[in-house]
Image: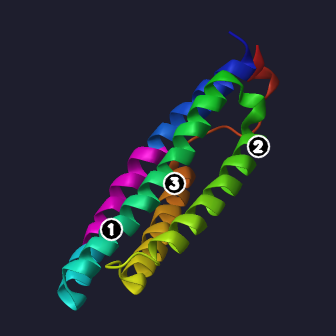
């Protein structure tokens, strides 16, 4: 097995770890947002918050799943894949928000606040998880042999 393939497998495993940690924390925060919205403005707001949290977990989780699959197969494409997946995620999230706020019965504020809070928590959890992972950045001659 080549060093490039080893790096791809290691990166794919890291994406799996990040996915599990970030989705657990973000899911918990999204549920707190649902309860707060439900108490604050009723069932329509609670449902809107639930939809917002589910969208964030699905979109952000899909990015890590795609990144894991691509890096396992072709680790040299990791940067290009990250840029494409990020761009698609932002556009689709914007379209989803725009369409959902026009649906009767959806509370725009509850949806928006939940999306923002859950996304920020997801990114913070992913950043913390990445900082805790022990991934070598540089390949030395000793590692390559």
Q: Quadrant of residue 105?
A: bottom left
Per the rendering, the mark at residue 79 is 2
In the rendered image of this protein, does residue 106 appear above or below residue 9? below
Local packing at callout 1 (Cα closer than 10 Å; few below 14, some 14-19, many 20+) is many
Pointers 1 and 3 in contact (CB under 8 A)?
Answer: no
Task: Check residue 81 for magenta coloring.
Answer: no
Per the rendering, the mark at residue 30 is 1
Task: Check residue 30 for magenta coloring.
Answer: yes
Please provide percent x and percent y for residue 140: 79, 28
Q: Which residues are magenta?
A: 18-32
Q: Residue at x 76, y 33 (%)?
A: 77
Q: Earlier in the sequence, mark 2 or mark 3?
A: 3
In the rendered image of this protein, does residue 81 appear above or below residue 110? above
Image check: 85 left or right of 139?
left
> SS of the residue at dot 3?
helix
Q: Residue at x 64, y 31 (%)?
A: 70
Secondary structure mostly seen in the magenta stretch? helix
> SS of the residue at dot 2?
helix
Please provide percent x and percent y for residue 72: 62, 25
Please provide percent x and percent y for residue 10: 59, 29
Q: Earlier in the sequence, mark 1 or mark 2?
A: 1
Q: Residue at x 24, y 89 (%)?
A: 41
Per the rendering, the mark at residue 60 is 3
Q: Nearer the viewer, residue 94 or 84?
A: 94
Please provide percent x and percent y for residue 37: 26, 82
Q: Nearer the viewer, residue 70 or 58?
A: 58
**CA–CA distance between discs 1 and 2?**
29 Å
Q: Quadrant of residue 39?
A: bottom left
């Amino acid at each position: 097995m080549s060093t490039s393939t080893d790096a791809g497998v290691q990166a794919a495993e890291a994406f799996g770890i990040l996915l599990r940690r970030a989705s657990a924390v973000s899911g918990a925060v999204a549920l707190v947002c649902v309860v707060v919205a439900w108490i604050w403005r009723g069932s329509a707001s609670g449902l809107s918050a639930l939809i917002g949290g589910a969208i964030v977990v699905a979109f952000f989780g899909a990015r890590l799943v795609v990144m894991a699959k691509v890096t396992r197969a072709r680790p040299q494409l990791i940067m290009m894949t990250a840029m494409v997946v990020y761009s698609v995620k932002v556009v689709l999230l914007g379209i989803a928000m725009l369409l959902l706020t026009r649906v009767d019965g959806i509370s725009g504020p509850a949806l928006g606040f939940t999306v923002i809070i859950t996304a920020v928590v997801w990114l913070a959890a992913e950043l913390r998880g990445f900082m805790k992972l022990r991934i070598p950045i540089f390949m030395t001659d000793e590692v390559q042999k």
